[in-house]
Image (cartoon, coloured by chain):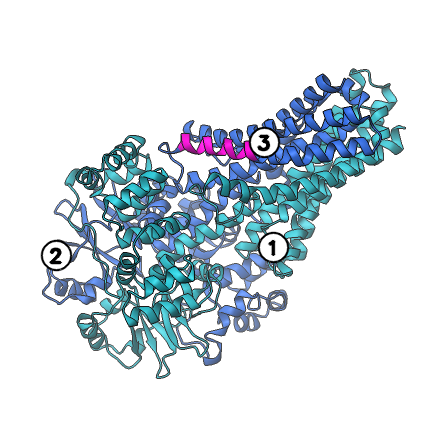
Chain colours: A blue, B cyan
Amino acid sequence: MSETAPIEEEARPENETSDSDAQFAEDRTLSPEFVRAVADAIEAEDAEAFEGLTRELHPADIADLIGLLQEEDREGMITLLGGALHSEVLAELEEDLLEDIIEAMEPAKVAKAVAELDTDDAAFLLEDLDAEKQAEILSYATIEDRLALRAALDFEEESAGRLMQREFFAAPAFWTVGQIIDRLRGTEELPDRFYEVFVVDPAFKPVGSVPLSTLLKSPRDTVIETIMTSRDMHPVPAVMDQEEVAYLFEQYNLISAPVVDDAERLIGMITVDDVVEMVREETQEDMLALGGVEADTGLSDTVFETVRSRFSWLAVNLATAILASLVIALFDAAIGQVVALAILMPIVASMGGNAGTQTLTVVVRSLATKDLTASNAARIVFREALVGFLNGVIFAVIMGALAGVWFYMSGWGGESEAMRLGGVVGAAMIINLLAAGLAGILIPIGLQRAGADPAVSSAVFVTTITDIVGFFVFLGLAAIVLL
Amino acid sequence: MSETAPIEEEARPENETSDSDAQFAEDRTLSPEFVRAVADAIEAEDAEAFEGLTRELHPADIADLIGLLQEEDREGMITLLGGALHSEVLAELEEDLLEDIIEAMEPAKVAKAVAELDTDDAAFLLEDLDAEKQAEILSYATIEDRLALRAALDFEEESAGRLMQREFFAAPAFWTVGQIIDRLRGTEELPDRFYEVFVVDPAFKPVGSVPLSTLLKSPRDTVIETIMTSRDMHPVPAVMDQEEVAYLFEQYNLISAPVVDDAERLIGMITVDDVVEMVREETQEDMLALGGVEADTGLSDTVFETVRSRFSWLAVNLATAILASLVIALFDAAIGQVVALAILMPIVASMGGNAGTQTLTVVVRSLATKDLTASNAARIVFREALVGFLNGVIFAVIMGALAGVWFYMSGWGGESEAMRLGGVVGAAMIINLLAAGLAGILIPIGLQRAGADPAVSSAVFVTTITDIVGFFVFLGLAAIVLL
């Protein structure tokens, strides 16, 4: 695949250079007025106005702009552009948008865009299409491109093999700096950008790497074996999951990494610019999972898709809420006698839910960054239990006193009942916050040990436990002590 | 500052190269047994055994190892190592650990480590120390280092000025590739690693950049003006917040960026390896904030620090839970007559809380990635309200029917009361899920417009609203319809 033709390479007007980024940060480049103007140009089918507005935009900003347009304007825009978007813009689109856009483009034009991109971006364009559409697009590609893409798509989604590009530069250890520079100047088939020369042994296994800055600092007659580093080279097996890949890049401050096959032969390269986005996505997946939202949803989904994707989680929550209600129902007689119990019980449950969520959030973060491992799990479990217990004691004192005073002042009972109610609230608070601490750490650890994602579904388990424990302990103790 | 001396540069043993990363992924390199062995070596004050165990480890892994040790072993380790850690290990430590470690080291040894690092890492070592300690350490540094570090520390924490390193390579536009290569080979004061040559005008303002790979591909007599790109160069003002910096790197796939002062003069460079970590931290800050945890907490905090940091959020939650209880208390007479209300009311509130959290999580994510902007806010608000309403209708039918049947079967009332109760549950569900959708989007948007962080404290607002609306509407309607 050849190098991508840049959309715009000339310098920006002088007075825009350094302000425009700050402006974008404040939402001025893609301001509502600007988006409106673009939409107007599309609706008026005014190709010249559209071109004038978008010419100076970076492909990534054009991709964002498309996300801000309404659906009918998106289709109108593709028509206006002659049925195709620039390959660099396609590579920057959000996944949920990309599928619609590719569907709307002619297969031959998609194939042309695919040919312009590095393998990783080209595979990204094709991966979510159905097999028939993929085959149709690939039928327009050259044999080399077709083979390379088929090989890329054979790797699982979110694996290193799918993320890598097949374009890289490798050299044997006995070459000199001068030989490499001469070769680089003469080779057409180089990746668009690269940051390291991989050093390979005769079996094409990577044995080290030389950052381009080191190469440039060294005299021409330096043998690269003497300047290569193996400590900062981390070969990535093609089957490795992208979450692990992201971890390696972050842990070892990598800029690029060689990808190897089962026989440890160099077959591709992953660069850090793809990893930055991946790190955000992986971390956001944890956040979304904790918030009870499916990871692959976005603002471009239709209302129906969104209702459906939120529904399943709410249905699980309904089931657990009913479970908690059944616990309350066990004590209907007590509530009938002392209505104050119904008023106070949500406080105990809510405090437990919040304390549990705090612990859970910290634990999910620590598991993702591998700060929490088998080596320190026992210590951290003990710590969280202790933190839960101590906060339980503090809030037991506060809420126990408040509840007693409230009960007494409202005239629901005498001094002795008020004190006993305060004691019940306090005891329930301690027990529930201890349970919250334990559930908040044991559930995600347990899920991870069982091979599941510790972020997905752990929130619902934790709050179910704190609801049930909260209601049961508070109402149960009250029934014993007060009635 | 000179280049950092590498800890270990020789090639790894043949059979370890490609397996070790996968092993680490499975927690075997820093296995509990390994950590135990290291702790034993420290406790036995066996420097040789310690050295043997840790020699092959990457500095980043040593930093992780230190995090897994108990506090007394950490101190023992510093003593064992002659009172200092290697500068590369220091640069990789978690913030909460770093402070303790630096405190335990002699100022002169900290100063030596500082001298070995690039400015950004050196500033990271010093930034959390008190002024006195900083001054003491800096008194051991050379005048140049002292001035550079003072300048770095003068920038606000989390600003581009603090993140940047002062080591970079720039050249005027009329230089040739050959001139640059010759200069690079002769210059000692280069950054450890760099990826681009910045092209500057006579006022030292960056006007473009040349990736090293482009430099290497071009003949010696090429004038760099002809190969530089300005589209892919995004100058970062030194005062820019790191969240914005991370956004620029991710949006434009940057590997490095020039940092400029108020007069747009080039004063430093930010590289992507620092950004990868920052992207994770910024995203995790959102996750932690949504989970009600302060961002700068970690597993290395003491139990007391953790109790204190969790306390404030739980206290806010207690206040809002009491507020919700006051709403329940308004209807104590109704609950006294129909205990089923107390049993069902948490279901309505809980569904609202969960639906609100779903919306809130998606919105916080979309605000962070700038998928949600002023341009499409109105449309997305309408969408979320519609999604809330539709899911409200679905769950109104399910839960209304369930509640009616439950009420009737339990013999709490007759057929007509059961139907009316079902209707009340359904109506309350629709209203609360609609309120949840609106609160879940309007609160974070409102916080952002007001200049606050949309993730911090929005969760508590949203659940307060869904609790209050849930209890008020359900109990209020029940009081009207049933009594």
Q: Where in the figure is residue A88, as x and y percent of width and height?
A: 42, 60
Q: Which residue, given by chain and number where applicable, does mark 2 sit on?
A: A226
The mark nearer the N terminus, 1 or 3, is 1
Q: Residues within 10 Å of mark 1 (few under 14, many from 20)?
A: some
Badge 3 amino acid: Leu
Q: Where in the figure is residue A99, as x and y percent of width and height?
A: 50, 49
Query: Considering the numbered disc 3 on the image, is that residue within a helix, a strand or a loop?
Result: helix
Q: Where in the figure is residue A452, as x and y percent of width and height?
A: 45, 31
Where's the C terminus of chain A, which quadrant? top right
Disc sitting over residue A433 in the figure: 3
Query: Considering the numbered disc 2 on the image, is that residue within a helix, a strand or a loop?
Result: helix
Which of labels 1 and 3 is toward the front?
3
Residue found at x 62% / y 45%? B459
- Disc 2 to disc 3, C-alpha distance: 59 Å
Judging from the image, mark 3 belongs to the subunit labelled A
Q: Is residue B49 left or right of residue B368?
A: left
The mark nearer the N terminus, 2 or 3, is 2
Q: Are marks 1 and 3 on the same chain?
A: yes
Q: Is residue A426 left or right of residue B61?
A: right
Q: Are marks 1 and 2 on the same chain?
A: yes
Residue B407 occupies which quadrant of the picture? top right
Q: Is residue A114 above or below residue A288?
A: below
- Disc 1 to disc 3, C-alpha distance: 48 Å
The front one of A430 and A131 is A430
- Asked whether the viewer can see residue A295, the reply is yes
Q: Which residues are magenta?
A: A377-390
Q: Residues within 10 Å of mark 3 (few under 14, many from 20)?
A: many
Q: Is residue B483 left or right of residue B241?
A: right
Judging from the image, mark 1 belongs to the subunit labelled A
Badge 2 amino acid: Thr
Residue A263 occupies which quadrant of the picture? top left
